[in-house]
Image: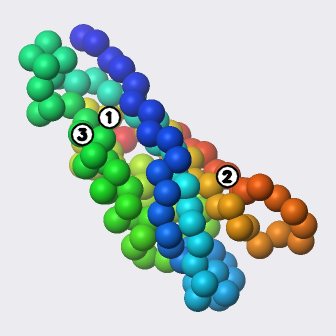
Amino acid sequence: MTRYTIHMKNCAFFARHGVFEEEAVLGQRFFVDAVFDVEPDHALDEDRLEGTVDYGAVFVTIEKVITGKRRFLIEALAEDVAKAVCAEFPQILKARITVRKPNAPVPGVIDYVEVSLDYVP
């Protein structure tokens, strides 16, 4: 059986996550990278979308999580994304989700804070 990996890079969303109330009021952009190890059943042999991972649908699922319920921790946000996508697509054997927060409230200059986690359903 063939396995393959899907990479989705720099998916951008506006949301209101963070510990501080100002983050909830002002909001900011968050960026998500998603990497999925997939076992596609017979979808590749038959060259069909059914039975594999529709990355357009994955994007919509990620968007719902990121723009949904406020999370204090981007770690928890990344885990929520992984759980939601893996629940929707049982073909995913492993998900690596990275969430970047460019305007993290730190006392200095920083490009972004980034959290990555691996999730195995």
Report the Cα–Cα distance between label 1 and label 3.
11 Å
Does residue 94 appear in this view? Answer: no
Q: Please state the horizontal and vertical placement of residue 82, each as a whole percent of the image.
A: 42, 49
The answer to which quarter of the image holds residue 5 is top left
Q: What residue type is labelled 2?
A: Glu
Q: In the figure, 110 relative to 39: above or below?
A: below
Q: Which mark is residue 92?
A: 1
Q: In the figure, 81 relative to 5: above or below?
A: below
The residue that appears at 38% across and 56% down in the rendered structure is 62
The residue that appears at 56% across and 62% down in the rendered structure is 30
Q: Mark 2 points at which residue?
A: 114
Q: Which residue in the rendered view is the most extreme toward the right? A: 108
Looking at the rendered image, the quarter that the C terminus falls into is top left
Q: Name the residue under label 3.
A: 54
Q: In the figure, 76 relative to 16: above or below?
A: above
Closer to the chain start, of discs 2 and 3, is 3
Closer to the chain start, of discs 2 and 1, is 1
Q: What element carries label 3?
A: loop
Q: Mark 2 or mark 1, which is nearer to you?
A: 2
Q: Which amino acid does label 3 sit on?
A: Asp
The residue that appears at 49% across and 77% down in the rendered structure is 70
Q: Please state the horizontal and vertical placement of residue 83, each as a whole percent of the image.
A: 38, 52
Looking at the rendered image, the quarter that the N terminus falls into is top left
